[in-house]
Amino acid sequence: MSPDITQTDSRLLAARAELDRLWERGTRFLGCRVAIMGGAMSWVSESHLVSAISNAGGFGVIACGSMGPAQLEAEIAATHALTERPFGVNLITMHPELDDLIQVCLAGKVGHIVLAGGIPLGGAVRAVKDGGAKLICFSPALVLAKRLIRSGADALVIEGSEAGGHIGPVSLTVLAQEILPYVRDVPVFVAGGLGRGEAVLAYLEMGAAGAQLGTRFAAATESIAHPNFKRAFVRAAARDAVPSTQLDERFPVIPVRGLANAGTRRFLAHQAETLHRFQAGELTKEAAQLSIEHFWAGALRRAVIEGDVEEGSVMAGQSVGMVTSVQPTAAIIAELVDQATAALAARHG
Ligand SMILES: Cc1cc2nc3c(=O)[nH]c(=O)nc-3n(C[C@H](O)[C@H](O)[C@H](O)COP(=O)(O)O)c2cc1C
């Protein structure tokens, strides 16, 4: 072996050890080798993808979405059957059966529960913690981060508006500067727009404990998403992943980032028509709002499972531009680790 190769190898080994030190807080908290969480994605994050992420050294998270307790119990059992590594479950705080779902997670020996979709109530926080699980919450601002930690959050995810799915108004670049320097009590994971290891490394160096990615994993080989859904991801550029548009401030639209398609164009026309009917006195304000809210009912399933990427909701982050092929989950994680390691090694070169 030439001395050059040995030198390169030892530089890479040292860089990998440095990366492990940088995200040690995250790996210790999650109980995995690589502090990369697979963000929960409704319809996508089920046993196959979740176990593939955990088996590859990351941390998979089941998306409970609108599942009931029996369905979630079966999903947890199916995931345990595919991996011996730890994984988490993401529950939506406004789910009508939240208390039962928490008990299902605890009975299923799920060590980490993510409460998403709003600030969790005290009862839910206590149930998770009394049951011995670790609680992860989303924080969209520094004041809320502090409040969530006071009320019992063991870790936080800060998700920028670059992300796929439901989004807040602030980018990760800004959220990270607002929150990372001031939150030291609990590990903070960054999410939104991440597609390469160098970017993950930059946030670790700012104080993040790890990262959460969704879009890149949605297009992984093990993802059960329809081939049309994955193909749309491979084809799309960053600018194709746009937030839903609200036509009138009297009728709020929940901001969701996804690929522009016939459905998003029809949504605009539907809002215009609903507004017209409201102004003509044909619809009450409540009926008009409901009609707008119902437009997307079942649309994510339609795109993910049925493969209707024209009319369905193709939720995707701006990181979709970095999805260039359908890759095995382990290859995605290895690529992220290699990119971060190479960036560190280059500094010592
Ligand atoms: C198709 C899709 C569905 C998603 N569904 C959920 C969900 O049900 N619950 C949730 O907390 N986040 C959801 N997200 C957000 C992800 O968990 C993750 O935080 C986000 O994808 C990270 O940004 P990225 O897409 O740029 O990697 C979804 C994202 C995508 C792309």
Image: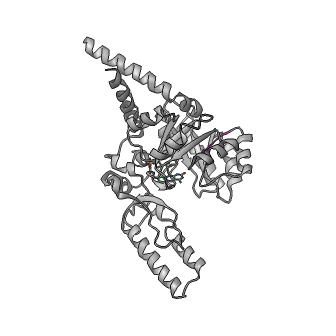
Residue 262 position by quadrant: bottom left
* Image color mode: one colour
- Give the extent of the magenta segment: 133-137
Q: Is residue 264 magenta?
A: no
Image position, residue 347 (x, y; %): 34, 24
- The residue lying at 49 percent from left, 52 percent from top is 170
Image position, residue 219 (x, y; %): 39, 48
Q: Is residue 186 left or right of residue 254?
A: right
Residue 239 position by quadrant: bottom left
Residue 275 versus residue 259 in the image, above or below: below
Which image quadrant: the N terminus?
A: top left
- The residue lying at 43 percent from left, 33 percent from top is 201
* Prevailing secondary structure of the magenta residues: strand
Q: Is residue 78 left or right of residue 239?
A: right
- The residue lying at 61 percent from left, 36 percent from top is 186
Residue 191 shows in the view:
yes
- The residue lying at 58 percent from left, 52 percent from top is 64
Q: Is residue 34 left or right of residue 70?
A: left
Image position, residue 341 (x, y; %): 38, 28
Residue 186 versus residue 346 in the image, above or below: below
Judge by depth and name the residue closer to the eye, 64 or 273. Answer: 273
Q: Is residue 135 magenta?
A: yes
Judge by depth and name the residue closer to the eye, 229 or 207. Answer: 207
Residue 50 shows in the view:
no
Residue 20 versus residue 234 in the image, above or below: above
Image position, residue 199 (x, y; %): 40, 38
Which image quadrant: the C terminus?
A: top left
- Figure disc tally: 0
